Image (tube, coloured by chain):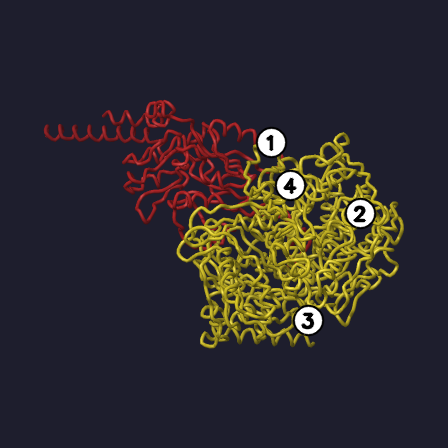
Amino acid sequence: MTAFIDLTQLPSLTSAEAEAATYGARRQQRMGFFTDTTLCIGCKACEVACKEWNELPQDGYNFTGMSYDNTGELNGYTWRHVAFVEQFDRTDGKPHPEHPSTTLRTGSGRWLMESDVCKHCTHAACLDVCPTGAIIRSEFGTVVIQEDVCNGCGYCVVACPFGVITEQTQEGTMGKCTLCYDRLKVGEEPACAKACPTDSIQFGEVDELRERAERRLQQVHQRFDGAQLYLTSENDGIGGGGSMWLLLDKPEVYGLPPDPIVATKYLPQMWKAAGIAMGALAATVVLATLAGKRA
Amino acid sequence: MGTSFGRGGATTFQQDLQNSDCIMIMGSNMAENHPVGFQWVMEARERGARVIHVDPRFTRTSAMADLHVPIRAGSDIAFLGGIINYILQNDRAFKEYVVNYTNGPVILKDEFQDTEDLDGMFSGWHEDKGGYTFETWQYKGMDLHGAAGQREGESALAEREPFQQREDALENGEPPHMDKTLQDPRCIYQIIKRHYSRYTPEMAAKICGIRPKQLIEVAEALCSNSGRDRTSNIAYSVAWTQHTFGVQMIRAAAIIQLLLGNIGRPGGGIMALRGHASIQGSTDIPTLFNILPGYIPMPHAKAHHNLAHFIESEGAKTGFWGNLDKYTVSLLKAWYGDHATENNEYCFPLLPRISGDHSAYRSAMAAIDGKLKGYFICGENPAVGNANAGLHRRALASLEWLVVRDFHEIESAAFWYDSPEIESGELETEAIPTEVFWMPAAAHTEKDGSFTNTQRLLQWHHKAVEPQGDARSELWFYYHLGKRIKHKIQAQDEPWADAIRWLTWDYPTKGEIEEPDAHMVLREINGWDSEGKALSSYTQLKADGSTVCGCWIYCGCYKDELNQTARRKPHTQQTWVAPEWGWAWPADRRLLYNRASADPDGKPWSARKAYVWWDSVKEQWTGYDVPDFEKTKKPGYVPPSGAKREEAIAGWHPFIMQDDGLGWLFVPNGVVDGPLPTYFEPHESPVKNALYGVQSNPARQVFPRKFNEYNPSPSEQHGDVFPFVLYTYRLTEHHTAGGMSRTVPHLSELQPELFCEVSPELAQLRGLRHGDWATIYNVRAVIEARVMVTSRVQPIRMNGKVLHSVGLPYHWGSRGIVTGDTTNDLLHIALDPNVHIQETKGLTCDIRPGRRPRGKARKTFLDEVRAKAYMETRV
């Protein structure tokens, strides 16, 4: 029953020690993104730069009607996605001349924009469940799918608490952001961060980005209603993200889970329970057999 | 811009926006259409600047602004006039700046009459010719020439003798009659105060459909962020230029910035954001019919018989335009080389002449009328992008031949078998005589060359790869076309053939495809001296034929035999002005009129806003930028009487291109529709002009004719047949008429379909459902679009009613990966009289749910719409 014991140690596979053991001297600082939505102008340069660099195809010419977002979501072919949220509700208080029961709205309101990407979780469920070893943690601490190893089983799709991964239908493999692994290897920043004209997408060492995010929140929390950090804490359900955000409203407003939990968090207990159940079952069978023999 | 300050370009550069204390973006959706430059607005905001967006729609720019004011499309001058009135009524002008640097203290001629006297008209109107003459708009005791804009005698008044500037009028560098206390009722400051006295917050609010306190909030933000220690910027783009009074909107901004003392100073200025790459370049080295390189006027058939007469009538006596002879002769030497001699007036007689308005719209109408046989279309897609695109398709279908140079077979090349008119049966392929030559064009990555961007900055781009297949650069195409024409003309006997035969046309070529060397073209534009050495400044130009220069304002871009435009030192390795990145005209100055960043004595107005100042030890101007002033001219320099050219400009007058060196609050010469911006309704408007008896700009150009019908206006007096305001715009995801974006998968998927933006209230009123289809129509066209119901679009209250609007991006056509109806089919051709730019930002329309009629039903539908519209008009 040694396999069960190993599984209970799952989270430590993603710990710093495990990475050190894997990469030794080749290990780099953990790199990530800090996306500051107070600076995002919704230009989608990140989406285009990502697809150009990673040679991803278009994935549908569909008018969604969801504000200016015709991308819809992250998937195997879309590794950056800009969400648009329109928040207009205030009125001028006077009766509407054509519809006296209502009033005219005033100029105030918000149009929130946020560029979404793979979170490169500290505890990455996709990596945990991948049966082929196609998903690895790179020397930069990022979570990368090796497309030439992936067999398309799709376990990662259901494991990801953010819905980041889907199948690349033409190839049959799974796809998601690699944090431009090939660019990092040659000392370049990821294509999206490079293309961002307002530095809403910032690339850097995760530890430094977490500090930067804290400082930025202190700076802007009075100017922007609802400013809050997302995935900057090591104590959240995924152990903090390699990608983190400064948002202007609750995560769910942007379509992000408010309290994500690594899908494999309860796996040890589940295996334990399963083990106990199996043990009980085995014992029952043995007992029943013995009883049967006795009979 | 040219008429107010002296040069037709942005007064500042985008990086300088970071120094602003307040930025008002109006007539521009900067975040969407200039996202890279917008980083400097964001930088200013991070530094504490107030960012204001005034726009009918809540756009991605509004989302980033501290304040958004949703005005009615086309009501901008009422809003800007309201700000001017607020400044003057509350005594908030920067007086020291106004008194010394602007023509505010100048007394006008007694004959001048204002719109307040004549209910919307100025003195000098000629009803028979439909235009103004400028005599009554002059300074008392002095007639002015103007650095830019239109001379009289060009279009409507072509028969008249050109207006003459009187010599030697300046006295000690100043106009003869001034009141520096600004109290005289005939001084320009007081005339402006009276002109705008009825533009109260209440009146502006009524016209714009806002609340008075919104106007006051904006005006107060600009006033409190201007002065010695603070500066405000105004940024605009094509949503100001595309009106029948577009020039006047920019003029109104100029008046605000001059009154508040914001021109020529860091963080101040007017940031003119151009429509797309190198549009600035296409007016500097013009593709326009009425100017030669460097804004030298195109000679007129009736007015300019010889060179001396041309210089006499078009050049100024004082200011840098007093050197027109040097600029013109050097240009002629560049074009005609050794053939250009003093004896033959440097070949001036060989230049083509204009005889009136030959702009693109006139040309298209001439084609329909059979007066124009052929057309070249390069990097443009009029069948989608031009106002009243349907008229342009008919124009193309009337030609004998057409050359289209583009990456793809765009709508303007495919109109003869794929267009709404073919679909409806109004045109038939077999009946279209046009022979179309579609030639593949090289992309900017496939050729050397330069872009002149929105801030007059020339940036060189190097070829990365060879063009594929038969694709060729524009330079290759025109150079080799020119060579073939020259060859064919060689044997011609007629004297006109010399105009082409004598042209220097000898750029060295490279490689297998014989690509002309773009560096050598740039070097010719820069010019050289009698020894063949590259010039370093336009002040070296001479009128005796010893210098060669293809465009005087670009002189210096090849200084020291180096391509200065190819300099690429990162801004992180130099000052924030980044003088070693690219090259800006004129003379590599980044911030124009920067003499005004110092006080009359030459000292910075404040330490915080120091930029260029007088170094009294070295006895020269110095600072962070190239001084826009003669380097050693003392701040207290008093010109001797009778001084000419730049010597006539006083040491405290920063606007060196103007005859008097002053910023023009009031323009005596150069703007054909009036010396002061005045509020008029758009050509098609739902409402009556609340300020004057005159409804629309009396000097606007209109073309009532078949295929360019106008909706009855104002709608409220014509049965409200087209009750809604229509305006058009662009999206970040697409490029103009779509030839470079609807053909790219990664851009097409981001905005795949044409949509119309309507408010929830309008959706309720007309039964429109989000995501479904809507049909939008007026007397010119009917199109369909997906419905985007959004609270970002707001109805406004006007005259106790609710006024709705329909917003439409205009990127779609029938070709490419993603297709859709062409929004610009709904637009009409009614033009600004100064620059002949169309009105796309304020028209009228109606909207109903569902898809549009197809095939023959389209024509039937439109016939019915027109019948109803004109029947209501007669009532």
Query: Could you classify mark 2 by the number of other residues whose Cα lies within 10 Å: few (under 14), some (14-19), or many (20 or more)?
Result: many
Q: What is the letter of the yellow chain? A: B
Identify the hue of chain A: red
The residue to which callout 1 is attached is A219
Give a yes or no on whether discs 1 and 3 share a subunit. no
* Disc 3 from disc 4: Cα separation: 45 Å
Mark 4 or 2: in front is 2
Q: Which sits in the foreground, B536 or B621?
A: B536
**Residue that mark 4 sits on:** B17
Q: Quadrant of residue B261?
A: top right
Judge if badges 3 and 2 mark residues of a common chain: yes
- Are the residues tagged 4 and 1 within 8 Å (C-beta)? no
Q: CA distance from mark 4 to mark 2?
A: 33 Å
Name the residue that disc number 3 marks. B718
The spot of residue B374 in percent (x, y) is 53, 69
Chain letter belonging to callout 3: B
- Residue type of the residue flagged with mark 2: Ala
